[in-house]
Image (cartoon, coloured by chain):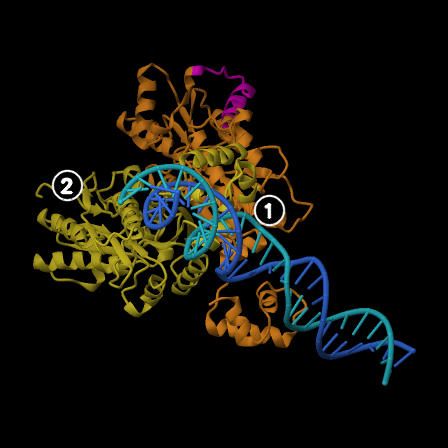
Chain colours: A orange, B yellow, C blue, D cyan
Amino acid sequence: MNIYDISKKTGVSIATVSRVINGSASVSEKTRAKVLAAIEESGYTPNVFARGLGLNTMKTIGIMCADSSDPYLARAVYYIEQDLRKNNYDSLLLCTGYDHDVKVKCMDQLLSKRVDAVILVGSNYVEFNDEMNDYIRNAAATVPVMLVNGVLNAPNIYSTLCDDRAAIYEVTTSFINNGRKKLVYLYNSRSYSGMKKLGGFTDALKDAGIPIKKDRIVFIDSHNVSVQGAKKIVSDLAKKGVKFDGIIAADDIISVGVLKYAKESGLSIPDDLFVAGYNNFDISECCEPELTSVDNKLEVLCRHCVSTLMSVFAEDKSVPKRTVFSAEIVERATTDFKIK
Amino acid sequence: MNIYDISKKTGVSIATVSRVINGSASVSEKTRAKVLAAIEESGYTPNVFARGLGLNTMKTIGIMCADSSDPYLARAVYYIEQDLRKNNYDSLLLCTGYDHDVKVKCMDQLLSKRVDAVILVGSNYVEFNDEMNDYIRNAAATVPVMLVNGVLNAPNIYSTLCDDRAAIYEVTTSFINNGRKKLVYLYNSRSYSGMKKLGGFTDALKDAGIPIKKDRIVFIDSHNVSVQGAKKIVSDLAKKGVKFDGIIAADDIISVGVLKYAKESGLSIPDDLFVAGYNNFDISECCEPELTSVDNKLEVLCRHCVSTLMSVFAEDKSVPKRTVFSAEIVERATTDFKIK
DNA sequence: GAAGTAGCTGTAAGCGCTTACATATTAAGT
DNA sequence: ACTTAATATGTAAGCGCTTACAGCTACTTC
């Protein structure tokens, strides 16, 4: 069952059938109707490979994310896939992990599949070390590259992101305004966005005239990013004699570890300790007490990313290269911000 | 840059280049090396569309899941994508939602993309009403269909699943053996697997000689499957005068709602109330007290599904049509099973 | 040394579609 | 009725690859 069958069935040439399929103009209404009826009746679907050969596109977008089982990234993938499909694009998903070489390899793989664009989901793709971003710039020479939560200034690269720095700055300032001066920051990513967040924390301290101490800024490597891992790290910190009355974490799961530590060591939250997380996951509502967190507007970012991509495809010249949204602080029971 | 360029560069015909690319035999070592070197040097990648036209496959598998932002399904997608890629297959992801018509449409879309197989992830694809499963059987006429957590007996359909019925039976029996007789079962899916779980619950009651009461078996529709939604449902149940000393839920998130209700109404867990969930999500470790749950071996299922698919591709005649794994009950602080 | 054989390699015919260009049809203007 | 332009359709040349088949070379074997 191919285009020739439809051609025979209707008595028109395959060119006309093709025109109908592609919605091209200059086909008479009568012919169009006849062809569509034949297609409908026979259940014919054009062969995508042949189509791809001719059009050099298969209406497929490559989505790269480090780990689609991460609730944050999973949600992003979901939103993106939904919106892409609404626009008649399919999604080729690659979970790359956090290793740079794997990312590069995956990018090659996507490009070799001739995807129409690549969407990089998550702040971990744009490295702070800019040389490592060459693979993204190279890709952009072939297809548009969309960054969700990452920034890279180069032709054909578009960014949609959330002002993470401002959000952490605000959280930190709220802690300070409520008398919490012994602050600890726990972070798990040295990506562009990870460093921005960290900057938000240190800037807030600076602006409040609080000295920045190295041992209060703790990096947690990926295999310790779990409830138990984070709990142990806070516990170790306390054992080392570090005092704290407020802990801000770059990811909710880390904060939950902090809560578990607090419970175990009899700390009362929020009286003895303020805790805030980031991402506003489901878990921030599941834990006890419920967690103050930063909602970084993932759905907004993702939808905007897709709509931007569609504008790029439409060769809309006024497409913004970078769009920044504001995060929203969702206060729950682990903090008590009297002063705003 | 195409196969002709490589042909020119090496002085062999395109047929030979093609043979090298496809690893076909009967190419001399010398020629092979020369061609590979040229490919390497020029960074040539075969055009997948042309390849697809010739071979009628693009080494792409369609993955359908209702909602990749659901932590359970997200993890499944992750495992499957990983394993598929290890086997040089790419993943075309479609999040279909729970609406039957959308599922059917998505299946068509996948088939029209000429995927090499379809993997349906999640128990919601196989409907208890068997007529509704025709779309799956039809698909299986074209490509192998793999079910993760679903069963359908038809040619070219392969199932990998977990014995959910046995798991719920065991949990329920453990509740009963510990003196909990006023049990409530909360479920959110009438899929094949959902009905099996429910059967596990009722069978356990039957075998223990406990009468089954309708108002203790509560269906929660999808928009109430959330912490707050579940909390309200339990609260309403209590208001209606239903007494309970044990609640078993078909999903962890529902159980967390139960915990929130218990806290609010001053119930002590596990003394006043046993609670068990299902799926053993991250959240079961985040909530307070930590949740007893059923680990249904998702990773095992997914990896087995992919390896089965590879066997199907290899035309291995001894591929099992159905493989059942046992779930594992992970006891945490919301129950206290003295007797096993 | 002729004939047969095994191992490589090349030729060319598709795969099913798109589209530039040529041609046929129709409508409009005089 | 006759030209001109606009519209509708057909023809055929690709797109870049795979692969059946044919052809060539270099060995055997008697």
- At 60% from the left and 70% from the top, the residue drawn is A13
Find disc 2 in the rendering and name its residue.
B336
Residue A211, relative to residue B152: is it above or below? above
Find disc 1 in the rendering and name its residue.
A308
Magenta residues (range): A197-214
How many neighbours does mark 1 have within 10 angstroms: few (below 14), some (14-19), or many (20 or more)? Answer: many
Helix, strand or loop at mark 2: loop
Q: Position of residue B70 (x, y in %)?
A: 37, 48
How many neighbours does mark 2 have within 10 angstroms: few (below 14), some (14-19), or many (20 or more)? Answer: some
Helix, strand or loop at mark 1: helix
Tell me which chain the residue with mark 2 is part of.
B
Residue B196, relative to residue C1: is it above or below? below
Residue A338 shows up from this direction: yes
- From the viewer's perspective, tell me whether residue A23 is left or right of residue A262: right
Distance CA(mark 1)–CA(mark 2)? 53 Å
How many marks the image carries: the answer is: 2
Label 1 amino acid? Thr
Near-viewer residue (C7 or A289): C7
Residue A145, relative to residue B59: is it above or below? above
- From the viewer's perspective, tell me whether residue C3 is left or right of residue B179: right
Corner quadrant of residue B71: top left
